[in-house]
Image (cartoon, helix red, strand yellow):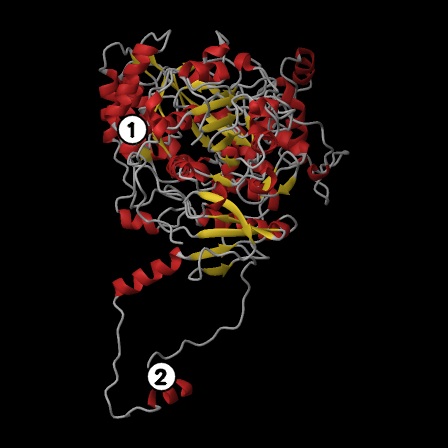
Amino acid sequence: MTLPAAPQSITSYRKYWAHRFGPAPFLPMSRAEMDELGWDSCDIILVSGDCYIDHPSFGMALVGRLLEAQGFRVGIIAQPDWNSADAFRTLGKPNLFFGVTAGNMDSMINRYTADRRPRSDDAYTPHGAPDKRPDRAVTVYAQRCREAYPGIGVMIGSIEASLRRIAHFDYWSDKVRQSVLITSKADILLYGNAERALVEIAHRASRGEKLSEMRDIRGTAFIVSHGWRPDEEWQEMDSSVVDVPGRIDPHLNPYEELPEQAAKATAGSDPSAPQVIRIESREERLARRRAERAKTVIRIPAYEAVAHDPVLYAHASRTLHLESNPGNARALVQMHGSRDVWLNPPPIPLTTEEMDYVFGQPYARNPHPAYGNAHIPAWEMIKYSVNIMRGCFGGCTFCSITEHEGRIIQSRSEESILKEIEEIRDKTPGFTGHISDLGGPTANMYRLACKDPKIEASCRKLSCVYPGICENLGTDHGPLIQLYRKARALPGVKKINIQSGLRYDLAVRSPEYIKELVQHHVGGYLKIAPEHTEEGPLSKMMKPGMGAYDKFKELFERFSKQAGKEQYLIPYFIAAHPGTTDEDMVNLALWLKKNNFRLDQVQTFMPTPMAMATTMWHTGRNPLKRLGRSSEKVDVVKDGYRRKLHKALLRYHHPDNWQIIYDALLNMGRGDLIGTARQCLIPPTPPGDKAAAARHRFAGQGRAQTPAPRSPCGAPRGGGKPFAGKPAMGKPAAGKAATGKPAAARPDTGRSGGNSKPGAKSGRR
């Protein structure tokens, strides 16, 4: 078996015979709709944890319309009752297979906050109703499909399956869980941007091939017997243990013959005869190595090992991330009991023409009529927005976009994007001329790529922009500026905002882009994500330092002033991220106070499956560096008290947070930050307590306090407890995306962070 280097275009397949039925107004969700379309059965049935909205921003619709364009009859089972298999028989037995997805979000992130509390709503459900999907939905849905129709092929995909394709730490159960392939009993798993693999699988299945027999498709994972190989040419590289120093053998002299070689060379031959020496050219040597690499599988530590050994878990995570470039990644294999989970290399990114094909299908751009006039929060948020690209080469360790969509940017053409804007104008009810966003995972990576495709194919860096922007990365924002101008010029378009998160360290490379953005596409506030101010946590996040932020802020304010606009930056920050000390959070709070920021809502770090920061959180090790038994350890904020403190420091100004900050500052020996002087973080009395403030003034203690004298154990004298031994004081309020407003522009409302809205754009890049 050899994985094809040059994949077949998704537009080149011969259409399946059922294409004669033509496109459906909406993909059917009931037998009655199938009858109206003249269908006696569905070829493929998609099961999803989201409600069905026929719009390319929703994975179920995008995949369904893509399969429909290939000629297949596709049915939808949206948010089925998982308590029995009956709901999975609604459309009958599919002719080819079930495709199972949890939806646009991981079901656990969708349902629980950073403090493991159930959310009160679900943005992907009519009226925002909660509890319409099960925990670990991919596993539950796949098992119900098996129960409904034993023997039917089951394929799993979506971000939930993609990020759980190997053994992974599960924050909600606080343990390492097996690959979702094992728990779901699916035939095949598609990870990453799966259109290419999906189309190939559908056509091969239509020719009678079983899903369980398809082993040569990139971007797929499956279960095999232990030790299975595609053919005898494949070799295994064992990476199931961390490297340890060993014996170093001296380099051999290439011109020195060993005794047995000399004997073999001279036996039966004339020693005086000339010997032929073949010199391998550089091109031949590289070609041979590439061929060997293409048939090499790396064995990472087994599930049973990573479940109990933090160092091996971190090593497996690092190996997975290093083998993520489609240009050079090798297959991976991980043992689970007596079986192996085999991962083929990542999918080849779609071309611009293929992206246009995927987004150019006849989407109805509305929720399915079965929902009537129900309010669907996620739909309301994106119905006037346009996705212009995929992927992110930022590599932020807390974010899973890179693991799912890859580092190579896949961009649509101008024509395709402008056509979609016109369709929004002409088809979407309620459109008033305002496009809410032209973006994607990041606002300003459109058409950015490595300057040399050969360098890109061989690169193994985890980020193109950390610790600095790679010299091989093209940073020309010209195509994006041109797109903005053409979109603004369309008839009926009055305003275009940019709400996707901006990568400001890239933007400062193009002042012209910042000027274009500020003058035409900012509606008063612009979201950017410094995430922190201190080098310690920033190095664990793989985020740039505050120098880039300061430069961007200077350009932003200059161009806003030139345009005669009063506009503000909205910074996002994360509390309790791995590698963050209490001193780091105090310094961040001081920065916020100095810059007159009062954050309305903040976010506490949530460990999500497969993210590098999650590896740090679970193992206390740094997978950004080579792992060993004595490798760098990372400070991890796990206990409830410290998490609450870190979150409180981001909202240092709020009266509810005064006491915990006051106690912590004294325990840290930073009583100098308590007082009324400008350099102080909090006042000596709770805000709003006028009686206490009056007593304090009367006692002449209005100046900053001096640090409390410290005992040898590190606690202030007078009965204070050491900080590390502070008892838990309950869980912090639920994490929420930070939406800080400059105090001068918008006074603090006094609101505390509540449950975040999963459907909201995060703006975090």
Q: Is 539 on the left-hand or right-hand side of 80?
A: left
Q: Is 217 on the left-hand or right-hand side of 512?
A: right
* Whether residue 212 is situated above or below residue 401 in the rendered picture: below
Question: How many discs mark residues in the rendered view?
Answer: 2
Where residue 355 sits in the image (x, y, percent)?
Answer: 31, 31
* Whether residue 209 is situated above or below residue 361 in the rendered picture: below
Q: Which residue is mark 1?
A: 356
Where residue 616 sits in the image (x, y, percent)?
Answer: 56, 44
Closer to the N terminus: mark 2 or mark 1? 2
Question: Which label lies toward us, 2 or 1?
Answer: 1
- Nearest the eye: 347 or 725: 347
- Nearest the eye: 608 or 230: 230
Helix, strand or loop status at disc 1: helix
Residue pictured at 29% horizontal, 46% vertical: 472
| Spatial separation of the CA atoms under disc 2 and disc 1 | 59 Å
In which quadrant of the rendered view does residue 86 lie? top right
Q: Could you tell me if residue 579 is visible in this image?
A: no
In which quadrant of the rendered view does residue 202 lie? top left
Three-letter amino acid code at disc 2?
Answer: Glu
Q: Could you tell me if residue 294 is visible in this image?
A: yes
Three-letter amino acid code at disc 1?
Answer: Asp
- Nearest the eye: 83 or 55: 83
